[in-house]
Image (cartoon, grey):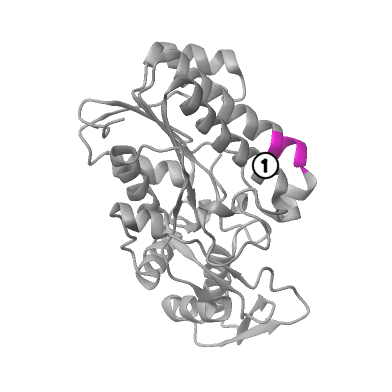
Amino acid sequence: MSNFDLKGARVWVAGHNGMVGRALVRRLRNEPCTLIEPSVQRIDLRRQASVEAWMADERPDLVFVAAAKVGGIHANDTRPAEFLYDNLMIEANIIEAARIVGTSKLVFLGSSCIYPKFAPQPIHEDALLSGPLEPTNEWYAIAKIAGIKLCQAYRKQYGLDFISAQPTNLYGPFDNFDLTSSHVLPALIRKAHEAKVAGAPDFTIWGSGSALREFLHVDDLADALIFLAKTYSDADIVNVGSGQEIAIGDLAELIGDVVGFKGGIVRDASKPDGTPRKRLDTDRLEGLGWRASIDLRQGIERVYDWYLENRADTAPAS
């Protein structure tokens, strides 16, 4: 299969209201393509007939499957049926409708949680299905693995150019800053900001702060996904990461510095650290010619500026 030319292409970003979808839409505006999107009232991605009818009318040439039901540990643990059913239906309906209407290219967005809990570090793509998943998000992970396998099956049976990318921990504008459900980086931005405003002497992080994590700005992810859409055509999945990692304690100090918080950071050792290390092996993507360009401090500065402008409305986008 040859490279995909975006010139004149009709492109649908499924999940265009989410953090990743919005980043893809921003990035695609620099490409010579036509963006199409349904109204919320027009399409329910969990309903096959709804998806097929809309795609039959619009006939997208390229589809990015960034739509998903997402949430933190508590949401995954208490609503497992929703996380498994909704995500299975969303991906299956879009992928099958893309086949029916003759979509030329499809890029499915997975997640680093597809890999086993104790995968060797950094995590290579070959680690998929090599061991047990992290129990706290297995429902979401199983749905994402099913989407990956569906793309591979459609390649094998129908010869379709459907590919799949697996991003590391993401952050960026339109992130979720709700302290009860957000991921670590946006939560730390909010904690540091609120401690600064309150004149508090410190703010608290969970655990020892020694756990290592990798972070990728969502604008870098969008650029990588468009790069892959244009140039990559293979059944093998591709990791998308920054290639850099940082201890959570160091991340908290960096965020405190960016925010302008002058106090201390308390490490609550009674709380868990989580997995000691979680970093993706990005050799495959770098070998194709793409590398992340947004430095972590620069990215955090951008996100904090966005947070200051939008903090009255920082609930997660649906």
Task: Specify whether residue 89 is in view.
Answer: yes
- 33 w.r.t. 290: above or below: above
Q: Position of residue 210 (x, y in %)?
A: 61, 80
Q: Give the range drawn in magenta.
A: 79-84
Q: Position of residue 127 (x, y in %)?
A: 58, 54
Mark 1: which amino acid? Ile
Residue matched to label 1: 142
Residue in the image at 50% along x and 87% along y: 262
Q: Where is residue 311 in the image (x, y as percent from the top left)?
A: 50, 58
Disc 1, SS: helix
- Is 213 magenta? The answer is no
Residue in the image at 56% along x and 67% along y: 121
Q: Where is residue 37 in the image (x, y as percent from the top left)?
A: 40, 26
- 131 w.r.t. 48: above or below: below
Secondary structure mainly formed by the magenta segment = helix
Q: In this view, does 141 lie to the left or right of 4?
A: right
Task: Specify whether residue 41 is in view.
Answer: no
- 273 w.r.t. 219: above or below: below
Find residue 308 and report its image quarter: bottom left
